[in-house]
Amino acid sequence: MTTTPSVGRKGMTQGMTRRHVLGAALAAGVAAPLVVGAGSAWADVGESGGGGTRLTLPEPTGPYPVGTVPLHLVDRSRPDGIAGPGHFRELMATVWYPARNVERYPVAPWMPDGALKAFLADAGFSAVAGMAPYTSGHVGAPVRRTGRRLPVLVYAHGAHSHQGDHTVMVQELASHGYAVVTVAHQYDTYTEYPDGRVGVPSEDPKAPTYPGDFAADLRFVLDCVEQIAAGRNPDVDGRELPAGLLGSLDPHRMGAFGWSKGGTATACATLADERIRAGLSLDGPMMMNPPLAGDLDRPFMMMSAVFTRDQDPAAAQFWSHLRGWRLNIRAEGAAHVSYGDDEALFPQVAKVLGWNAQQLQNWIGTLDPGQAVRIQQAYPLAFFDAHLRHRHHHEHLLDGPSPAFPAVTFVP
């Protein structure tokens, strides 16, 4: 399967939505016989969705355990025309952070149960719901406090995706001392609210799901970060935050990153908001609405796969507006999903479904999955460490090709 760009309902080149790609990939393999060797870890997986077996995500490599907590946020500056009078833009967000004393705190699921079921049902693959992985994040664990506040990153998912889609990357950054806030962009995601409502992508043409809408969400979340930094709880339900979170975030060291449409939104937000000191796009198509205007003098990095500058004029145009430190890398053999959790999860799914090598490659490309995971753990960390912490201890990973990552090429 080729993830060819398509023009969305709002005339914006987005690439295939996460739901469309997932459904096509699963359809390619769901009819395949279940081929599992005797004694395999997958031998008890059946139609019921796993019989107790779960997919797994790689453990983060940083020195700190990871804590996590959800936030329920409402942006009262943005009325919600779909929900009606008296309603405003409503977001779920999750903060991931370095923690201490995590043993007593439960681990977080990859997605909330209601959102996960809706996500898989839309893809026609509800049978694997019982196999969904857990994360390395411990819900409500106290924050690890040191003499300095935590640098902050905000994350934007792709079209019809969800805020857990890059958990490998998110918890890796948290394990190295970052607070990472993932955002569920209303009307273009699968999410679950505290009262039990499940949000799914909307087909309403009036739904505010442009990259500019995502970017406005990111900027609002930066406002909420500033509230937490000042010791105020932005959660609209007033739920108690983990010990040590209030006052622990550094509003003067904030960055942003996102995948696909979220990468485009990251570029929009970085252009518009000087609080974002460094931005990272994971294969963003860069077709912006509102249109690109002005230059950017702060550091920006592009990790390309399908939306390369030689194939995507919008990406090339955006690159030409970068006046500060800039870097564009590409992993040979990468698919559009290769910088996210699918590289860790789909090789496991392929074993369950008995997919052959070609069926797996149709989804995640030809990049070795193990190297893909290491790339998404190493390069974003090196980038944000260099530009938010002024640390350059990653063996000059950003300076040029590395023998540790032979698939990564530097695009001049």
Image: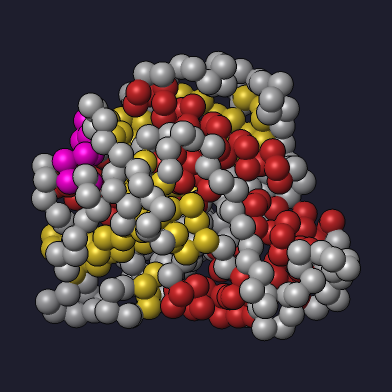
> Which quarter of the rendered picture does the C terminus lie within?
top right
Left or right position of 331 against 12: right
Specify whether residue 248 is painted magenta.
Answer: yes
Q: Residue at x 36, y 73 (%)?
A: 192
Relative depth, front residue between 291 and 129: 129
Q: Position of residue 200 (x, y in %)?
A: 42, 75
Q: Quadrant of the N terminus?
A: bottom right
Q: Position of residue 284 (x, y in %)?
A: 50, 46
Indicate the position of residue 55 as horizontal and vertical percent values: 63, 62
Relative height, residue 132 to residue 243 (above, below): below
Asked whether the viewer can see residue 265, the reply is no
For the point 88% across and 68% down, the residue is 38
Whether 299 is drawn above or below 164: the answer is above
Q: Is residue 146 visible?
A: yes
Q: Where does residue 290 sit, x and y in percent of width and height?
A: 33, 50
Tell me the residue at 26%/60% (across/down): 71
Q: Report how many numbered discs are placed on residues in the image.
A: 0
Q: Is residue 58 left or right of residue 327?
A: right
- Image: magenta residue range: 245-252
Toward the viewer: 130 or 154? Answer: 130
Would you place residue 199 above or below residue 386 in this image?
A: below
User: Taking 301 as reference, is 179 left or right?
Assistant: left
Instruction: Examine the structure image and report whether residue 149 is included in the region drawn in magenta.
Output: no
Report the side of 208 relative to 408 (left or right).
left
Residue placed furthest toward the bottom: 48
Please tell me in which quadrant of the rendered image residue 310 appears: top right
Q: Quadrant of residue 367?
A: top right
Residue at (54%, 37%) from the top-left corner? Answer: 61
